Image (cartoon, rainbow, N blue to C red):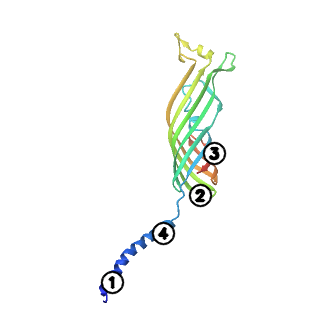
Amino acid sequence: MTKSPIKNIFLILTVMTIIAPQQVVAGEADSVLKMPAVHLHHELTIGYGEASSDQLFDGLQIGRPGNYRVQHYSGAISFSYKYFVLPQFAIGIAVAYENENGIWQQPYMQQTDEWLVTQLGSFKRAAFTPAIELMYIYKESKPVRYYCMAGIGFTYQNEVDIYSDGYYLTNYQNGLNSLGKNLQIQNNRYHFNGQITPIGISVGGRISEFMELGVGYKGILNIGITVKL
């Protein structure tokens, strides 16, 4: 018996409706597989900075009399972690730490018109700053990378002031010492802090060296090493 032409056409259309979608899906899968992969990675950095915001703006010297002289300063030591959510943009966290110690002194003039310096006491201080950071790479020509960075956080300050015996004993008035009850005073406080780095340059591959110019908790000049994970 001869098949009807209508039945043949219907059979062909049915086969085509089954095969065509499968070919389209396969084509879409091939196109997805052929798309270039975006290289998103993690980075760890360790840095050393000079002239941090706390050191420059005297943010950690709390109520210290006379003129102070720093005898040791650790510099701003920082650790950072960044994750690149886009090839040129990263978000991360950082911590910075610094400490210093020294003496404060008071110059005065004798009746002989000679200047003498009396040591009023000593101090030691430390600062710890956790922060959130954003980084943008505005030019990259391997192995050189140019970028900028900004961060915001808060700083915990701890300072211990120790008065010299002679200075402490001369500050009694009406039976009370104006410096307090103890030779040693401890001051703790918090304040907001930030970092603005308009110029950053790194050179290298998986392990690279960097130099940054900015202002904030990492210092005006910050140098260190970056490791890409």
Compute the Cα span from label 3 to label 2.
Answer: 19 Å
Nearer the observer, disc 4 or disc 2?
4
The quadrant holding residue 18 is bottom left
Q: Which residue is mark 1?
A: 9
Which is more toward the observer, 182 or 31?
31
Residue drawn at the location 55% of the way across and 22% of the way down: 185
Secondary structure beneath dot 4 equals: helix
Question: Residue 224, which numbered label?
Answer: 3
User: Considering the numbered disc 3 on the image, is that residue within a helix, a strand or a loop?
Assistant: strand
Query: How far from the left and from the top, in percent, is residue 124?
Result: 60, 27
Q: Nearer the viewer, residue 139 or 207?
A: 207
The residue lying at 61 percent from left, 49 percent from top is 227
Type of amino acid under label 4: Asp
**Mark 3 or mark 1: which is in front?**
1
Q: CA distance from mark 4 to mark 3?
A: 43 Å
First in sequence, mark 3 or 2: give its number: 2
Which residue is identified by label 2?
A: 140
Determine whether 176 is above or below 20 in the image: above
Q: Nearer the viewer, residue 133 or 69?
A: 133
4 or 1: tag closer to the N-terminus: 1
Around disc 2, counting alpha carbons within 10 Å, would you say few (fewer than 14), some (14 to 19), or many (20 or more)?
A: few
Q: Earlier in the sequence, mark 3 or mark 1?
A: 1
Horizontal arrangement in the rendering, residue 32 relative to residue 215 (left or right): left
Q: Amino acid at mark 1?
A: Ile
Q: What residue do we see at 58% from left, 23% from top?
A: 161
Q: CA distance from mark 4 to mark 2?
A: 31 Å
Out of 208 and 102, give the one closest to the viewer: 208
- In this rendering, the answer to whether 36 lies above or below 55 is below
Q: Which numbered mark, 4 or 3, is in the foreground of this view? A: 4
Amino acid marked by disc 2:
Glu
Task: Tell me the crowding category of disc 4: few under 14, some 14 to 19, or many 20 or more residues within 10 angstroms, Cα based.
Answer: few
Tell me residue 16's x, y (percent).
37, 78
